Amino acid sequence: MRICDLYSSSGRIQKCTTRLKERWLETRTVWRDDNGRKFKEEHLDPLAPQLTLLLSAIQRMSGVIDKAVKELEDPEVADR
């Protein structure tokens, strides 16, 4: 039994991040003033490191959950 599927969530986050980057590139073709630059610096640029940390945390949490599920399904695994 699968308790949760963080891998799918991680994939959706990556896909949405790619779409956001694509849309921003399209937007920048018409929004080329200081407000556009400021928006990117204040809102978009900080997302990259935060998303990297988030995806790393999701990966670690998925491993922990998978291990816990295996141990709960097979008590002998916990004894090893």
Image (cartoon, rainbow, N blue to C red):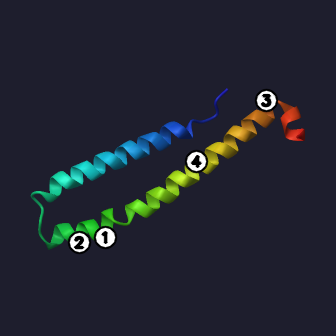
| Residue furthest out toward the front | 80
**Crowdedness of circle 2 by 10 Å Cα count: few (<14), some, many (20+)?**
few
Classify residue 13 as left or right of residue 79. left
Tell me, for residue 73, which label it has, or none: 3
Q: Mark 4 falls on what kind of element?
A: helix
Dot 2 or dot 3: first in sequence order is: 2
Q: Please provide percent x and percent y for residue 78.
A: 85, 39
The three-letter code of the residue at mark 4 reads Gln
| Residue furthest out toward the top | 1
The reply to whether dot 2 and dot 4 touch (C-beta < 8 Å) is: no
The reply to whether dot 3 and dot 4 touch (C-beta < 8 Å) is: no
Split into 4 quadrants, where in the image is the N terminus?
A: top right
Split into 4 quadrants, where in the image is the C terminus?
A: top right
The residue carrying mark 4 is 59
The residue carrying mark 1 is 42
The residue carrying mark 2 is 38
Dot 2 or dot 4: first in sequence order is: 2
Residue drawn 51% across the image and 51% down it: 55
**Crowdedness of circle 1 by 10 Å Cα count: few (<14), some, many (20+)?**
few
